[in-house]
Amino acid sequence: MKMEISDQLKSAIAELRKSEPRKFKQTVDLVVNLQKFEVKKTPLNIFIRIPHKSKDKKIAGFFESKSEIIDSITEMDFKKYNDKKKLKSLVNKYDFFIAQAKLMPKVATVFGRVLGPAGKMPSPQMGIVLNADQKSIDELREKINTSLRIRTKEPSIKVAVGKEDMKDEEIIENVISIYNELVKALPRDKENIKNMEIKFTMTKPVKIKLR
């Protein structure tokens, strides 16, 4: 089955590469269409590690003191984010937020109302450090940059799996990693996955059949 998926992906990517060139690097998007799956009953909210990162995510940290290696919002800065405009602007500026464990109650109080709905709240799964030292931050940053968050809001999952300038093999390996982890996470394994589609930002999707 895995061979068959990778062969289909190979020809799908070749097909996508024939499309009209654009003036920007297109994102490679994967759509996984689900079946026999009740989103409200068994929602998914997981992180999946992929072998090849497609970009460095913009990360900021809530720390007790400024860090030299990452944009920092210190406890002293918290009060200025009572201003809703500043708070929204901060949340939109970064892809991901991390926090020192001891500051989490305050982070939840001050930033939770905006970070929560945006899906950017630091979580024990990915985003909380005990100490804001260089080693801990570097390790977490590497983990974040090679991880994708999958949250189900509807019976299909849409996720960016790479950029068009990546090698075909790297895109394929990322897709297969996601497929394998989803099979493990879904209540009925492969039965819950109807099919997959792959596309570039500006192209029509190409379908990947699974059965």
Image (cartoon, grey):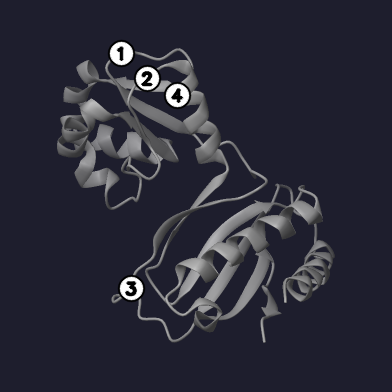
Earlier in the chain: of badge 3 and badge 4, it is 3
What is the x, y in percent for residue 192?
Answer: 49, 81
In the image, is 145 to the left or to the right of 153?
Answer: right
Residue bearing mark 4:
136
Q: Earlier in the sequence, mark 2 or mark 3?
A: 3
Quarter holding the N terminus is bottom right
Mark 2 sits on what residue?
132
Distance from label 2 to label 4 (Cα)? Answer: 7 Å
Horizontal and vertical percent position of residue 80: 20, 24
Question: What whole-number distance in Å separates the C-alpha atoms at marks 1 and 4?
Answer: 15 Å
Instruction: Rate crowding at label 1 as few (under 14), some (14 to 19) or many (20 or more) other CA atoms within 10 Å.
Output: few
Q: Kindly identify which numbered label has been placed on residue 42.
A: 3
User: Is label 1 in contact with label 4 (beta carbons under 8 Å)?
Assistant: no
Q: Are marks 1 and 3 in contact (CB under 8 Å)?
A: no
Q: Amino acid at mark 4?
A: Ser
- Cα separation, mark 1 vs mark 3, equals 39 Å
Comparing labels 1 and 2, the label whose residue is closer to the camera = 2
- Contact? badges 2 and 4 (CB < 8 Å): yes
Residues at badges 1 and 2 in contact (C-beta under 8 Å)?
A: yes
Q: Nearer the viewer, mark 1 or mark 4?
A: 4
Q: Amino acid at mark 1?
A: Ser
Residue for badge 1: 65
Q: Earlier in the sequence, mark 1 or mark 4?
A: 1
Secondary structure beneath disc 4? helix
Q: Decide: is 108 above or below 21.
A: above
